[in-house]
Image (cartoon, helix red, strand yellow):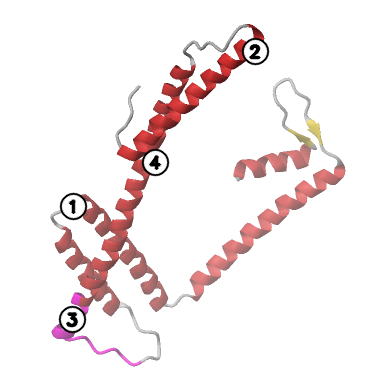
Amino acid sequence: MRRVLLVLALSAVTGCASAPPGGTPFVMTPEQQERHRGAIESERQLVASLRQQQQAAELAMTPTDRARRALDAAKITRENELIERAVSGSPDYTAAVRRAAIANVDGEAAIPQPAGTPRRAAAGPTAREAAITAEESRLSEAVEVRRRQRLADQAATARAQQDQQAAIICRARGNIAGSQPAFGGFGIAGAINAGVQQGWAAANTEAACFNAYRATGIMPSY
């Protein structure tokens, strides 16, 4: 994007666009130069507006909002780490779920309340333990769903790559079959018939090869 804007800016100033070596630069008309300048100015104003909106949103955030945002980000990080442990079969997975649940529950309890709201009573050991157990269950279910999806995606990617490799091999086998001499008669018509026969041989061999692979799952060989 920066490079595009730089090119537009230079074009707007010089009235020329870059050309291939040895080529003739494209000279813009005054109207085109004005449109380029307008596009650059619009982009600059948009970036400035977005920056101002972001700054205003930051200033408007309360301590509660900031704590909530930080906790939500930490929860996402912990869940992603659990996904990696689950997929890799880490022996520490169960303990990691417990640690993440404790961190999430304690993080919720540490979020400051908005100004003007009654002070929240500290949860007793029994209530805290119940909250941790519930969070463990939620994390385990969420991680399991994502673990299965990750494995399904990996299996689909591996199968697609295998299918592509099989298609390449079968196409090569078809080309070999199609390159074998064929007799279709004498003269021009015979040569045309021979070419048709070779084309059929190539197509039929490729199709038979790939169909056998799909039916058995056995990778063909050259």
* Residue 24 higher or lower than 127, as above or below: above
Which residue is depicted at the point 49% across and 27% down? Answer: 203
Residue underneath mark 4: 160
Q: Nearer the viewer, residue 161 or 192?
A: 192
Q: Earlier in the sequence, mark 1 or mark 4?
A: 1
Q: Is residue 187 above or below residue 155?
A: above
Label 4 is placed on what type of residue? Answer: Ala
The local secondary structure at tag 3 comes to helix
Query: In this figure, which residue is indicated by the disc labeled 2?
Result: 189
Secondary element at image label 1: loop
Name the spot of residue 20 as percent of width and height, x first: 70, 25
Look at the image and say whether residue 132 sits in the magenta stretch: yes
Mark 3–mark 1 contact, CB under 8 Å? no
Q: Give me the residue at 26% from left, 62% from top.
A: 144
Q: Residues within 10 Å of mark 4 (few under 14, many from 20)?
A: few
Binning the other alpha carbons within 10 Å of mark 1 as few (below 14), some (14 to 19) or many (20 upward) gives few
The residues tagged by marks 3 and 4 sit, at their Cα atoms, a distance apart of: 45 Å
| Distance in Å between CA atoms under marks 1 and 4 | 25 Å
Q: Is residue 21 visible?
A: yes
Span of residues in magenta: 118-133
Residues at marks 1 and 2 touching, judged by CB atoms closer than 8 Å = no
Magenta residue check for 171: no
In space, the residues marked 1 and 2 are separated at their CA atoms by: 66 Å
Mark drawn on residue 27: none
Q: Vertically, is 139 above or below 2?
A: below
Name the residue beneath numbered marker 3: 130
The residue that label 1 is drawn on is: 89
Secondary element at image label 2: helix
Residue 19 drawn at (x, y percent): 72, 28
**Nearer the observer, disc 1 or disc 2?**
2
Q: Which of pointers 4 and 2 lies earlier in the amino acid sequence?
A: 4
